[in-house]
Image (cartoon, coloured by chain):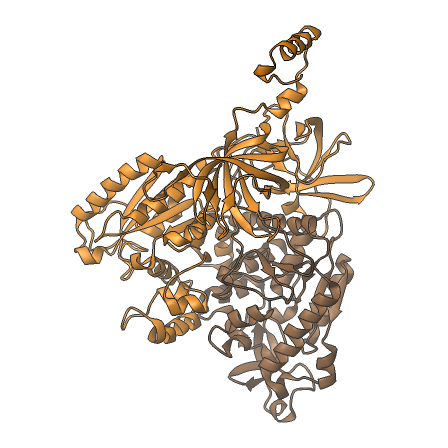
Chain colours: A brown, B orange
Amino acid sequence: MVTQERLTHLKQLEAESIHILREVAAEFSNPVMMYSVGKDSSVMLHLAMKAFAPSKLPFPLLHVDTLWKFKEMITFRDQRAKDLGFDLIVHSNPEGIDMDISPFKQGSKVHTDIMKTQALKQALNAGGYDAVIGGARRDEEKSRAKERIFSFRDKHHRWDPKNQRPELWNVYNTAIEKGESVRVFPISNWTELDVWQYIYLEDIPIPSLYFAKEQEVVEYEGTKIMVDDERMPEELRKTAKKEMVRFRTLGCYPLTGAINSTATTLPEIIKEMLLSTSSEREGRLIDKDQEGAMEQKKIEGYF
Amino acid sequence: MDIINYLKKHENKDMLRFLTCGSVDDGKSTLIGRMLYDSKMIFDDQLAAAESESKKYGTTGEKIDMALLVDGLQSEREQGITIDVAYRFFTTEKRKFIIADTPGHEQYTRNMVTGASTADVAIILIDARKGILTQTRRHSFIVSLLGIEHVIVAINKMDLVDFSEAVYNEISQAYGLLADELGIQNTYYIPVSALDGDNVVDKSNHTPWFQGKPLLELLDTMDISKEQKSENFRFPVQYVNRPHLNFRGFCGTIAAGSVSVGDDITVLPSGKTTTVKSIINAGNITEANREATVQEAYAPMAVTITTEDEVDIGRGDMIVHTHSLPRVSNSLKVMLVWMDDKPMTLGRNYDIKRATSVVSGHFEHINYKVDVNTYERTQVKALELNDIASCRMILTRPIASDSYKENRLTGSFIVVDRITNNTVGAGMIVGVSRRDEDVLKRGSKHYSDAEKALNQFIRDNFPEWECKTV
């Protein structure tokens, strides 16, 4: 007789996420997994590698490169693709490149719309994906708390928050028409603490930007941002000073706030997180644009 | 505390999912906001956002409106009601909690059913001034229908009845009768004031007569292990993993019981038998070792199983132990919750998704509809949005079926409209319809020549008996 110990919360979450990933692979003909290089993406990739072992991933990973990501993210991304042998698709909005979009010039709203939201739509249309796996979590933001794990999108990638399909037990409705798609969020039920704890337990590689290091930073729109390249306006760069900082999320370097920290190990990061008094998204400049900002962005097709 | 020790402790935490039932008037969002706030899961910037929104939409005057911390969508905040299921999270040293926060009004019955489907525990809020209301009966019915075995009755707004023990006793006793009527196994009663935090996290000084635990402590310590009661191995095949010719693995999440290498297994509905050759527990896979195997695995692990013989197995099949076969049938008695604006019509074809199998089918007969408030049964010909009814479901192919009572994951299904693709209903298997025979038994039974001759004789001479051919 097998002794059936109750699984720990992380093992339960892990099993649930693997179930969701397999459901996608089984039910959709052309799925893709979003890969943003951040810690949540790293966890998703790790889960997917478990779900389909000993096979390779049955779907490609898609990175929407806004061309303003931290340099280290790109190096890290390419190294992971090489080590794990997954198919990597990278897309940047060619119109945005022509317009030479910069968060410093056009601001975060325009930059995010053109280089992120529009670029994502282009990549999804080009790939004709019927399922797009994303790493969003319900604890991140209030409108996400209500989104389904299998979240339906119409032909225009739009989300209708008031008309979501009921989602019961672990039975997911995967039926769609041609041209429609679903966004699937396998780590919906994980919290930031769960993610960190899992990275620690499973020893999952993440970019070193998450750990405190001495970096060149400047004050920009009320947040500390890192000087990652020469494209930062000269007058801003002149104000740069060296500080011990790390990042709680990774995105476009001009839009990602650094926090002062001395946490150089995972336990130290987790400790800092537990003691901190501001939620993770505070470091992202996007959400502050307007109240209900995320709900609006999601309706328009943003992840 | 030392962070390494802290992490050790939190590695071994359990998880508990609960549902909160009640309407805005009962202070449900306030209670959740209070739990999140007092367990320090609300961060400063979210609190600041709630403060500024309190001025705009708040209903609590000078105090921060806790409800605004949890009411998610902008349209809902403006209306001051919760209209969809929202999931919230908080953690203590012992458990991680997932709250399904659902609306309480009758027009949102489907949302509550949705939230209840994954919950281990339900918290039913009762306004101390009002006692058991129609909605309490409705919420309790849905909780029992969805198989939730533990109900915490939070008697709220005790501050408005001077923390009266008599009021508490009266409501507890009245609810006890209701729980008995519905067959709810375990009930717990707590006098609370969500607005001020009495008996939510800490024991209140206002209720010296109350001997029980405050809400959070109860949630932390209650035993829910009995939830996993079915020991019969059930493995719905989700995905076939075939990296190369020498490996053919059947992936899925164990819905119940356990399995070991060497076990005799049967594949349903085909009835073919084989033996377990190897088991991969996906959770144990590492980057360095992508072929790690285990000797045994159990629910709710996500695993990959290989078999000794090359048997035809595909997605939608159910692998079970040969010594504990479920019934296999295409005719099932079910409880159905209708979730679509368009009514359910008898005879119409729908897709039925149960675990990993999708089979088309229709509802042949409505035995009765249950009134969620009075529990009265009535005869109807169609089901409207939020109707709950006992029906007979006929599938185009037989499936291995456990009752929902025995197994929540293999006894439940969703109904998908074949034209709109919407999830239009959710159901729970009550049993195999008695009128129909068990397909598996019929298929495997061997008849002697004499029995076959008898069958032939009956069919020839007594056609009015409608005897089946063997």
Q: Is B27 in front, or is B206?
A: B27
| Residue A176 visible (yes or no) | yes
Q: Residue at x 37, y 76 (%)?
A: B52
Residue B69 position (above or below residue A234): above
Q: Is B172 in front, or is B6?
A: B172
Residue B30 position (above or below residue B362): below
| Residue B17 visible (yes or no) | no
Q: Residue at x 55, y 41 (%)?
A: B413
Q: Is B432 in front, or is B368?
A: B368
Q: Residue furthest right?
A: B245
Quadrant of the image for the C terminus of chain B? Answer: top right
Residue A204 position (above or below residue B242): below
Quadrant of the image for the N terminus of chain B? Answer: bottom left
Q: Is B375 in front, or is A108?
A: B375
Snapshot quadrant of residue B347: top right
Snapshot quadrant of residue B239: top right
Q: Residue at x 48, y 56 (%)?
A: B6
Residue B336 spot, x, y in % from top left: 48, 41
